Image (spheres, rainbow, N blue to C red):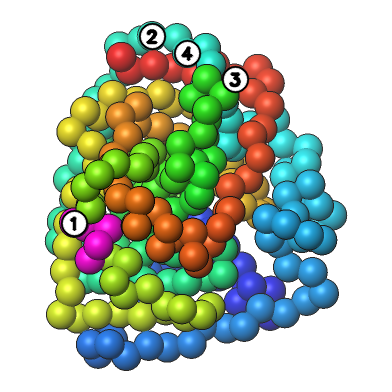
Amino acid sequence: MRALALALVCLLATPALASSTGHAPAKKTGTHAKAAAHEGPVHWSYAGAGSPENWAQLDEANRLCASGRQQSPIDIRTAYALALDPLQFDYQTSKLHVLNNGHTIQHNVDPGSWLQIGGDRYQLLQFHFHTPSEEAVGGKRYPMVAHLVHKNEAGQLAVVAVFLTQGTQTHPLIRQLWARLPESHPVAMSFEDQSYNPSSLLPRDRSYWTLMGSLTTPPCSEGVRWLILKTPVSISKAQLALFRKHFSMNARPLQPLFERAILDSQ
Ligand SMILES: [Zn+2]
């Protein structure tokens, strides 16, 4: 059951896993399929026996959660300004696929949406949410963050983080997505009659901080290129409350920076 348990992790890391959840042919409108139930004595979580300080002990495969020196998330305090390549988003319309994996709400995206950074090209696989934001800026965490997970041909991940803050307006894309949340988990649903463009989740200003980091969930694999947008996007108080009804807290504690430098695109 190990492979099935791994299929439930927050950041899908392998093509096989991505295709098993993210790029399967769309199902009929409103139908849902049950994913595998997880097994084992203690499953990772954000509180209790499976909480972050115990992740490395839960499974040998998770050892980097404790011993890694490029772990995420981090607090952004000092960053070095540099002329960095702009983030060029070429996102296409996707049907709505939603997965409640017990750790977050995840939206798998149809193939064809790309992120270009200089000569590097990554395909958008999925995005999901954390509350509060996992990354902090000057010690402060935002109410939420969206992580948009991309992968290049070599299998390397690039994650774009978009902070979500509480404002007065309802966010139209969030309204469309979260009107169709699976109440229980693990449950995946696809809606043939619902389509959207994930670019609606991005702020207009694409300036960013960047550093190398890790998955923020077990197995905490490193070599992940993090691109943290500086400009937050607003969602309403009711939208924030709706997510927190499902997940009251799903953020990993801040990790030491060690010898890494954070770069600032300005
Ligand atoms: Zn995440």
Residue bearing mark 3:
260
The CA span between labels 3 and 4 is 10 Å
**In the shown orientation, is residue 89 left or right of residue 104?**
left
Mark 1: give few (<14), some (14-19) or many (20+) Cα within 10 Å: few
- Residue closest to the eye, 119 or 67: 67
- Marks 2 and 4 in Cβ contact (< 8 Å): yes
Number of the front mark, 2 or 1: 1
Question: Residue 176, how many percent across, how many down?
Answer: 22, 66
Mark 2: give few (<14), some (14-19) or many (20+) Cα within 10 Å: few
The CA span between labels 2 and 3 is 14 Å
Ligand 1 is within 8 Å of the C-beta of the residue at disc 3: no
**Residue 61 appears in which quarter of the rendering?**
bottom right
Mark closer to the chain start, 4 or 1:
4
Mark closer to the chain start, 2 or 3:
2
- Residue closest to the eye, 51 or 55: 51
In this rendering, the answer to whether 90 lies above or below 125 is above
Residue bearing mark 1:
172
The CA span between labels 2 and 4 is 6 Å
Q: For the residue marked with disc 1, what is the amino acid?
A: Pro
Mark closer to the chain start, 1 or 3:
1
Looking at the rendered structure, which numbered label has been put on residue 81?
A: 2
Number of the front mark, 1 or 3: 1
Residue bearing mark 4:
79
Q: Residue at x 57, y 24 (%)?
A: 139
- Secondary structure at numbered mark 1: helix
**Residue 248 appears in which quarter of the rendering?**
bottom right
**Residue 68 in magenta stretch:** no
- Secondary structure at numbered mark 2: strand
Where does the magenta region start and end? Answer: 172-176
- Secondary structure at numbered mark 3: loop
